Image (cartoon, grey):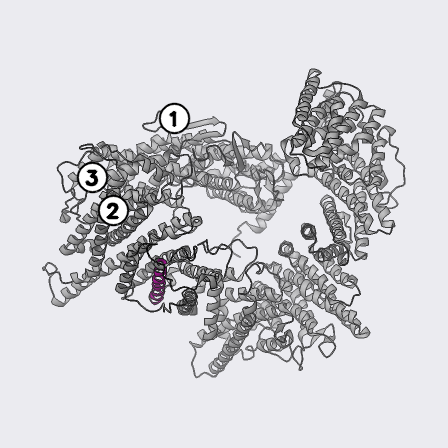
Amino acid sequence: MDASSNLNNMSLCCEGTSVERLELYKVALDCISLVFSSHGGVANQNMDLWILLMDKVLELVLEVVKMQLESSKLGYFVLQLSCCLFEPFAKFLRLHPTRKNNFHNFIDKLLVPLLHSSHVLHSSSWGSSIEWTNLSKLIEEVLAQGLFHPTHIDGFLNLQSSNRYRNSSDTTATVKEEKIAIKSYHRHLFDKVEKMIAEKNGSALIGLAELLHLFVSSVTKHKGVLVDGGDSKQSEVASKKISVSHSMEAELRKSILDYFVQILEYLLEYLNKYLQSDGEAVSLFNVSSTIRSINNLLASFINDKLYLRTEDTSEGAAMNFLKLIYDTLMLISSKISHKKAYSCGSDEKSQKELYISVRKDLIITVHHLLDIEYEVVGDDLESLWAMIFFSTACCYSSMDVEGQPLLFSEILRLGCKLIDLYSELRQVDSSISSLCRALRHSSSLVGDSEAYTQFASYSNALSMLLCSSKFRLSLGNAIKAIPEGQASGCIKQLSTDIMESLDWIKCGHQLKTEKSNKCDSLQFRLRAELLGKVLSEVYIIILDSITVTSGNSYLLGVSLTNLLEIIRPGLSNLVSSQEICVLVDGVTLSKTTGCDNVSICWILVVFFRLILSYRSLFRQTIRLVAPRESEKMSLVMSDSLTIRPASDWLEMAGSFGEDLFSSIIQPPTTVLDVIHSVLDICTQDSVVLCPPLVWVLNAVALQRLVELNLLIRSSEYKLQWKDADDSSCRKWGKRVTRMRNEAVGLTKFMMESLSSIYKDQIFAPSFGGGIDKSFSVGSFEEKSLAYALWWTNCQHVDIWCSHAAKKDLKKFLTLVIQASISYINEDNCHSTTNKPIHLEKVTAYQIALEFLSNTISYEQRFVCRYMASSFCKILQMSVSSIFATSGVDLSESPDWIKVISEVEKLSDVQIGGFLWRKPDMVPAENGNEQINVEFAKCQRLLTLLVQMPEEYLSLESSSLYITYILNLERLLVSSLLEWRSESCSHNPYQIFRLLVTCRKVLPTLALASGKVNVIGSSKCSLPLPWLLKSLSAVIGVQNTFPEDNAFEAKVAIFSMLHYTSYAWLLASKDQFHHEIGSILSDRKLRRKRKNLKPGTVEPDISECNLQSVLQLTDTLDENMHKSLTTFKDEFLHKGCQDLNKLSSTIACFQGLLWGLASTLDNKSFRMKLSNNTEMMTRINSSVHSCMNFISFLIKASFLEDQPSGKMVSSGTKGVLMKCNLEEQSCPAISDLEAFLSQVQHQKLCLKKSLLMQIFRGENAEASFFLGQLFIACSAVVRLNMQIDLTSIPWNLFAIVVDIAQFLLLEFSRSEEMPHQFTFFWLDGAVKFLEELGSYFPRFDPSLSREFYSKMIGLHLKVMGKCISLEKKEAKLDNQGKSCISLETSRLDEFKERLRMSFRKYMEKKSSELHLLSVIVAVERALVGEQEGVMANYEIVCGGSNGGEVSSFVAGGIDCLDSILELLLTGSKHLEGTIKEHIQNLVACLFNVILHLQGPTIFYDYVESIKAYERPDSGSVVLMCVEILTKISRNPFFFKKGACHMVQCLRVPGALFQYLLQLQIVKISSDIGTSKCAFDRKFSVELYAISCRMLCTAIKNHGSETRDCIALLEDSVSVLLHCLETVNVHHVDGRESFAWEVQEAVKCASCLRRVYEEVRQQKDFFKEHSFKFLSRYIWVYCGFGPAGNGLIREVDEALKPGVYALLDMCSADNELQNLHTVFGEGPCRSTLAALRNDYENNFQYTGKV
């Protein structure tokens, strides 16, 4: 006590407590712990002392919280002290129940601080920590033992408080005035609660919900002991277990309800006092606390499931009391609304926050009441909607208040809840009609103010709610869920409501006319605005969401006809006079009658939108009714042309004039005339008065254009087959002309509407705005209208573009390009990506980008025609803004010899050596920001070309693009070479980024032009010398970049090198292909002219065509010789600049070599080139120079200085490859064998330190340099297979092989994700190994088997490491999946290249010994045996994280899949070897599954100590199942044993029984030392492949499957049981093992295929069909393991498969067995319903 008292005094001193004092209390704390531990945790049985002590402790805890010292040393000490005292106090209360006096003392002293502390700990953010959570649990334990101890809990179970609310025989739902006597022992608790309410202790009142939860827990435990225990009645209880449990459950619910009622009555009594008082705003704070307490009590009531409608035995007491709560809350809301809380503009901000808080608590409480019992609303749904509307108005008028977003989200949730609730009750029409009535009635309560802002605020508030995307989606889904037979009734209800709304408008107009004051005029305008902005949105959603079927089409047609009769009078005289007139229920509304233009516009919005939706729905109806009825209905809609064939049109003289308004407006008027007439009142002084009407007019025009296009095209087609002199044809020809003119007028109107607002609205903002993807027309403003029109025109360009003028098309396309590059953010100067940040709204930028990314857009002729010129014009403007003084015309073709000469002169000047000469750029000090914007625009323009579909790039457009981009490159290179960092530090990097983007685009254009050249005669090529010289000139500019851009600069430089190399490849390939192809063409032509025989020797006369190619090789040779003389042995020490320059030379040369190799893949080209002696000599010379250059670089860079004889040479063989082309065999087999022998036995001293730096990504320049060396060597190896290369240094390739092995082995042993620079050399190394693999089929396999096996093992290890790095995303190779795409990661690309390399080692000409080595290596990998490793078994079962396998095993699985794919795609040479080992391979796969199966396969380990050390067990299992399915699918190639079929049928059930355990038991997700989460996506994939495995077994192995039918039934049952647990309510924030609805539906569709496959194999499974059907019915009825049954969506997905099972069953045998098994009950009823549905909807009964 003394220590507690001192601490209490000290708590006022914050952190001023001395260290010595804290140490003293720490010692005291240890002493207290020892005291309690010595007494078994309980000491001092004096209750008064305990209460006094705990009171002080709680006071101290609250003081620490108040002063925010919870994270301080003092706070931690108080926490330890509290836990140290609360734990023995709880034990004391458990062992020593409180007597009467102690009970009173406990309540008086501790109840309030305990409730306060519990509330504070639960609501604070730091209260979720483990230490404070333990204290919270101890406080709950003290409350439970002190108040609800089992000894005296019975007194709380006999309150009988709810009896006062039971239904009587005389009156229903009335409160009985009967006094319930509560034992004085327990009354004190309720007296204390009443006192707390009177004292207005808000924190303690909120803690009453926790008290209710503790009471429920205590009562449940207490009653559970009574039911299950008791020695004397044990047998009796056991014999009557079910009945006793049921009766106790009902009694328990009744007792808890009494306690709940007793507490709530005190709170309701306080609210009634407020209702009876004046209700000043000052007392509203206490009302807020009381409502929040009720809210928390109801939430606890829901969480503990204390009320179930079907199990309520309180004789209506629960329902009546909940109704009383609801009525009280509605009165509170009404009182606040009558005080105009929503318009408290003059109130203080604190008062606004208070009103917002009260509104929010009211909305949440009503929501809770609806969750408990929806009938609390009764028949007064209109009042609830009115409360929602007034709350929304309050929310809208308090935008600057802190709690406003939370209030609106709760209002939106409640509104959607009402719609969804009544949709489930099949009463959505009543909810919608109540909504509309409440909206109309609420408008009269807005106020009598003459300020328009108040009325506009109210309409905007309701628009914010009812036009929100979430509410509209909820309403649309509810309408779609209406049963088929109720659809016509819904339309009738809609017609009735429209009539009421029109009458409401008429009354408002008459009232305005009679009184003629401003307030009534504004009231009428408000009504018109609410009708057009809000109510029309509800009407349109109903019409657009109604589902039309053949069963309800006729009744819908009748209802729609009646609806048209309501709409038609309103527009019948629209343009009959000189002004717009609208007829509303017999009353004319026009400017003459006193209506303002805005009100008329809003009313027109309603009518026009109703007509559009009406016609759309009516056309759907006409298509489904009988032909005779469709003709009648088409007359109603005046749309006879759409239901008749074009052959009848020529005879229909009077049908041409039919359009949107032909049956409505009298006299008949065209759509274009109506639009122009309405547009006059819609705009005033270039200001749009009603933006929604402008959009509706555009929609009307677009709809009419659709009809006109159909009529014009059909008419023109039909007129082709008629005589031109026919009078009907001439008439229709004139009509087609008039239709074209009308279409031109409508298109002109649409273009004018867009152009009148785009300048100020679309491109002016910084694109933080935009428009919602599911926008609402009623909520349009002028700004959002611009986005909507822009989106509509871009989406429907195919409808209007054929009628637009050339000027408008060019203007539109220019706007599209400008919008697509106008997205500017803060990172424009530092980011090269073209993707914007994620925006919730659709912006003009996104709309334009979607237009340009859609291939359908390029199918429009004007896009392809004007795209290049428009693009280049915009590019020229942006470049001119940057290079203002250059005056360069990008369209001119420069003299590249002169340009290259100038660049060479500039590049000879070292950076920093001379004074800076200012380049042709705008000075940074005058326009730095504008330059940044223009740079960003250029970046986006160039990126657009990359995204543009290649098939729509013509040769002319590609040539134009290339010319502009090359000229831009010339300017950029010159500026980089002239720039100095002293002027502007960031501009050099900007220039270089733009240059890299230019170089990125060039290969794309070259590739597109190359595809065109295959057909065309001309060619579009790149100036390759310029690409080389410009690259060499700017490669060292990195030193001038700012330090903060160092990493990005490295990536940019490597990208520049890569794109240049790729451009060289494509351009050289194009040139080789063109030149060699021209040789073939010339020789064939001359042979034909001279009539020479095929064997006649002809001199080479076309070699001159190859001069351009020879010049390229000369240029590269010169560059390499220059590099060799410049960089000596010490070149490596000169820094990264030298390496990058070397990489530039190698990159260009390897691009040239690969271009030649790609060309020579054509056999005819290869033969013709081989006969060209001069060309072969030049190629050999160039390759020899290149290899000497590469050999020097590799030896100097990656080999230690070698003593003489250290490295094994290749012997006396100087030239390794000499090929006899006539024999078509591999060059110099003996020399190649000597090379392979050298590779297997030589020992090299590599510079491992440098190689490790490269491996770790520490030396990016060396990584890229080495990758280029690998690729260049692979190109030479490929060329050596194609043509006779007379001088190849094969000893160099031995070094390259050794380097590749070393690095790949290090990669396979690593335990971290590789650095992104690592992929530079990874791709090159694997590419080299791939080309090397093509040599193995050419020589005796006995000499190379060891090296071959080593290469196969290397592939397995590297592939396994890739799978480990991919974790849960690891998949087998999917056929048809592109490995190069924007979404594919570098790891995926590398993995695909590795697969290609592995397949190369198993070519068709591979020897059996080599193939056997592959199979043996894979088989050893599958059993976990790795050659050369001490561990004998790398498959582990039962670790802390479940079973595990090494990456080597996973690599074996993936490579096995590659082998099977080769066999299945035509590689028959593998068939014999595979068949011999297939049994062992299958057994190995089952062994892996057996070791890995467990619950952990469904987890994704997000944090782990060694995340990438081993592959994910779930992914490995998935791959195994896929391969087993593939094997089962091809029984011709793969013969599996009977035991393996047994395992195939058992695997799905064995795997998913663990998921079933997770769903039901919900075990912890913390496993071992890793944090993991349930991976739903993976589980769905595994479920799908498991179902596919079962389908494959049933289809291809029917007999074997029938013999194991029990296993099949078991697996299908487990898969079905997993569908029971579905996360319907989308619970977030906690671990859930349930699928979302869509995921469960996908799984159910897969299981349905199993049922259908069983039906297909009827001969095998007919007698077993009823077993599958019975299991489905049991689960459907809720008798599965989870007891949940199947939700509707899952059941609908399964139904076709269930019907297929029913189709197998005969009534006499299988169905009779089911009736016997089920007996009486829900299962038999379900079976009967299934049979009825099957016979009506599924069973085939023959032709009709």
In the displayed orientation, state which residue is furthest to the left.
Answer: 1097
User: Horizontal and vertical percent for residue 33?
Assistant: 68, 20
The CA span between labels 3 and 1 is: 38 Å
User: Horizontal and vertical percent for residue 432?
Assistant: 70, 57
Residue positioned 50% across, 73% down in the render: 711
Q: State the image quarter where residue 665 is shown.
A: bottom right
Marks 2 and 3: which is nearer the front?
A: 2
Q: Secondary structure at mark 2?
A: loop
Q: Which residue is mark 1?
A: 1433
* Amino acid type assigned to the residue bearing label 2 in the image: Phe
Q: Going by the image, does 793 lie left or right of 1281?
A: right
Dot placed on the residue nearer the N-terminal end, 2 or 1 = 2
The CA span between labels 2 and 3 is: 23 Å
* Amino acid type assigned to the residue bearing label 1 in the image: Tyr
In the displayed orientation, state which residue is furthest to the front.
Answer: 915
* Amino acid type assigned to the residue bearing label 3 in the image: Asn
The front one of 1272 and 298 is 1272
**Which residues lie in the magenta part?**
956-976
Q: Which residue is mark 2?
A: 1127
Q: Residues within 10 Å of mark 2 (few under 14, many from 20)?
A: some
Q: Which residue is mark 3?
A: 1291
Q: Going by the image, does 482 lie left or right of 1039?
A: right
